[in-house]
Image (tube, rainbow, N blue to C red):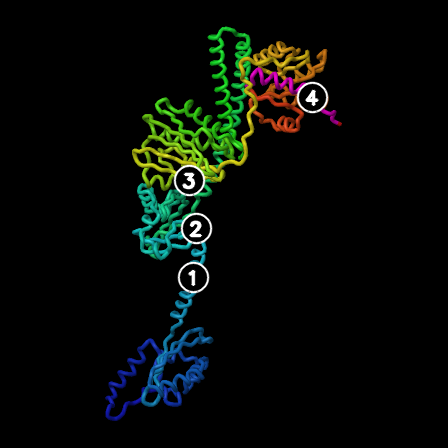
Amino acid sequence: MFHPPHTPASRQVDPLSETQLVAALHELGDGVLFLDSAWRVRYANRAAERLSAAPGSSFRERFPELDHDVLDEAFDRVVRTRLASTTRHWMPGTERWLELRAEPTADGVAVILRDVTADEHSRARLLESTAQLTVRGALLHAARDGIVLCDLDGIVQYWNPAAEAIYGWTAEEALGEHYDALTVTDDGVADAIATELAREGHWAGEIAQSTRHGSRRRIDSRRQLILNDRGDAVSVLAVNTDVTDARLAEEGRVRAQRMQSLGTLAGGIAHNLNNILTPILMSVQMLDRDESDPRRRDTLRMMERGIVRGADMIRQVLSFARGADSEHALLDTHALLDEFVQFCHETLPSSIRVTQRVDRHLPPLMGDDTQLMQVLVNLATNARDAMPDGGELILEARQEGEWVRVSLTDTGVGMTPEVISHIFEPFYTTKGVGQGTGLGLPTLQAIVASHGGRSDVASEPGAGTTFTLWFPVGDGVVPSEPADVRSHRFELAPGRGERILVIDDDSDIARTVSELLDGAGYSTITAADGRAGLDALAAADPPVQLVLTDVSMPILDGAGVIAHILQHRPELRVIAASGFTSNDAIARAVDAGDVAFLAKPFTAPALLNAVRAALDSPARAPRL
């Protein structure tokens, strides 16, 4: 048995005290050894005996798995410096970690052994968790979604770079601030989210939030309560994706599909309305030609103006509904503004007075007339909504250097600076739910920009609003329009007995066209559909020299008739008539010069001129 070293004689204790000391050392959980200067074991308690790997009188023999070169150096240093030293060692044989603390004694060292295997395992797990957290932190840092961690009071604890990009606040600025103050979520929405989050532990939805600079963004947000080991909620994780651009593109696709469907419907309606207006317009002009009573002639001319205005409205609705690829051409600025003013007179309430202040000599614009009309109509519609009790809409236009400046001013309710700062943002609207999409003014801004222009707005609450648009002056001269075909005293283009086949499923149009052409010196036959027309063409004697065919007909449409004629009777002249050119085959034939096109509703002079021009044109070469 080993005994602890004796103290000097002057400090000796009685045998009972030494026995008690030995007993106390044996009760310790840590191993205790006393080594002499040769590192021989002079005393080891029971815990040290259990930790020993082998019997022996020296420390090296008892613990052969330890790195004794290192320990010898450490023990020498303890004896030399009289300072304690602590080291940890792996014991492969017993698969344990030992911590050795060496303390200097009078003739050697005291070694305290502690089994720290559990502690080392915990440290390893901690290091592994730290590494995992580092990896996860890097992933959160690199995520494209805005990731925010808040405590239960909404104070931001983590704010990744994607959140910085979405909201404009840096992580340094965001940490310690309240989440709702940084993102400006509507109070009602924020309260509803908090309620469901507390009840369900999670929430997901799409909301509107604001950036640092005040712009509104559509955010796809997912919230999750974070629980501790006891199951108590300790924080809230928010994963936010900015879907503003995606929603804008989706809305654009939906609008395009809606407009395509509307275009199809409008095309059918326009065709029927134009069929109705065509015989009326030609009949009014034929009656006016033969009328000598001035009062009756005034009445007929008033009727003609109404028909023409109706036809123009149909054309405008059709162009808006069907849309078109943007094709910029040199435009008559006065004609565009006149058409817009006419639109305002016809569609705005009578309580709104329209005033023009337009310079007499405005240069042309290079642009798409349909898109520019869309811009002006959108502004007029907004002005109407801002003047529910009526007011004045003022159109001003003048040249300013290389720009044409167009402004629209209303006397409506006006806007605050806060509203003005957001009106060009997608989805922002001051109208009620279901009353506005928030896309009108962003679309306006995009159209103006695509024309090389710019826009501005000035408004004050109660003082109305002025939208100003600048467009670059077009380079060139607008081509002159052909002579007005709506002349009341038109001269009949003389026919020379040429045989003309009129094919139209509308009997009123067929009869009116036939009467006009017969009266002009032509010889006509009629058919009610394409199949009957081809039969009449084959049986005609004398033979037909020109075919005037409608495009939309039952049994066989105009495209089928034209294809048959071009294949079997290429010497025939052909005129296609329709309210719109939606048939690709006919459009290609018109572009190739094989077919002339006459837009419904056409006037009597337009019909006579088109027939004469077609008959006088060179014959087509036969197709091989």
* Placement of 379 over or under 54, stated as above or below: above
Is residue 614 found inside the magenta-colored segment of the image? yes
Comes first in the chain, label 1 or label 3 = 1
The residue identified by callout 2 is: 145
Dot 2 amino acid type: Asp
Which one is closest to the eye, mark 2 or mark 4? 4
- Please state which amino acid type lies under the numbered disc 3: Pro
Task: Please name the residue shown 36% across and 42% down the image.
Answer: 421
Gap in angstroms between the C-alphas marked 1 and 4 = 78 Å
- Residue at x-position 62% and y-position 19%: 610
- The residue where tag 1 is placed is 134
Tag 3: Cα neighbours inside 10 Å, few (<14), some, or many (≥20)? many
Q: Give the Cα separation between the discs numbered 4 and 3.
A: 52 Å
Q: Is residue 213 magenta?
A: no
How much space separates mark 1 and mark 2, taking CA atoms?
18 Å
Task: Please name whichever residue, 348 or 358, is drawn nearer the observer in this view of the structure.
Answer: 358
Q: Quadrant of the N terminus?
A: bottom left
- The image position of residue 292, as x and y in percent, is 52, 6
Q: Which residue is mark 4?
A: 565
Q: Which residue is mark 3?
A: 426
Element class at badge 1: helix
Question: Is residue 367 among what the camera can see?
Answer: yes
Disc on the earlier residue, 1 or 2: 1
Earlier sequence position, callout 2 versus callout 4: 2
Amino acid on which the number 1 mark rests in the picture: Thr
